[in-house]
Amino acid sequence: NGPSAIEIYEKGGKHLLTLTPVEEDSTSTIEYVRIRDNRYTTEKGITIESDYKTISSAYNVSSIDNMIKDAVVRIDDQNFYFTISKDLLPPEIRFDMTAPIEKTMIPDTAAPKYVFVSW
């Protein structure tokens, strides 16, 4: 079912990053990195613990994709994106993958479920 993720931990055992390769072989490159620790920040100080209001104030949200369990928040001209659990969104769109998700539908206090860096 695709390449195996590579998990990166610090010496104390805290999970820092998960790297996902493009292919499962020794010459593969990284497709994306999942940030798991709040010490990783963007140029504007956004971390995995930032809320949607802070994120959307710091960056221009270019689009929001409606996935099965999450909303994927894409940022203009950046190589990172956030996922927010649809459990935090209005009930009428939680179970409808065809419904458009508007920026105003995400509560200001919603924190990212995941932060990804891709290129």
Image: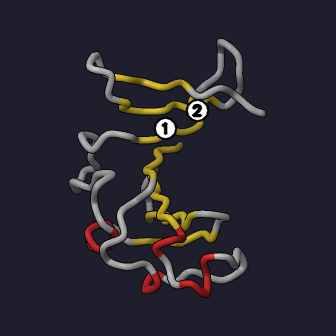
Q: Residue 71 is drawn in which quadrant? A: bottom right
The picture places residue 47, in percent across and down from the top left corner, at 28, 51
Q: Residue furthest top?
A: 26
Which residue matches tag 1? 33
Above or below 3: residue 80:
below
Q: Amino acid at mark 1?
A: Val
Q: Are discs 2 and 1 less than 8 Å apart at CB?
A: yes
Q: Quadrant of the image for the N terminus? A: top right
Numbered circle sitting on residue 86: none
Q: Residues within 10 Å of mark 1 (few under 14, many from 20)?
A: many
Residue in view at x 42 percent, y 33 percent: 17
Query: Gap in Å between the C-alphas at discs 2 and 1?
Result: 6 Å
The picture places residue 104, in percent across and down from the top left corner, at 43, 86
Q: Residue 86 is drawn in which quadrant? A: bottom right
Judge left or right: residue 97 versus residue 81.
right
> What scheme was used to colour the molecule?
secondary structure
**In front here: 111 or 22?**
111
The first of marks 2 and 1 along the sequence is: 2
**In front here: 6 or 28?**
6
Judge left or right: residue 105 versus residue 47.
right
Which residue matches tag 2? 20
Residue in view at x 32 percent, y 40 percent: 37
Q: Amino acid at mark 2?
A: Thr
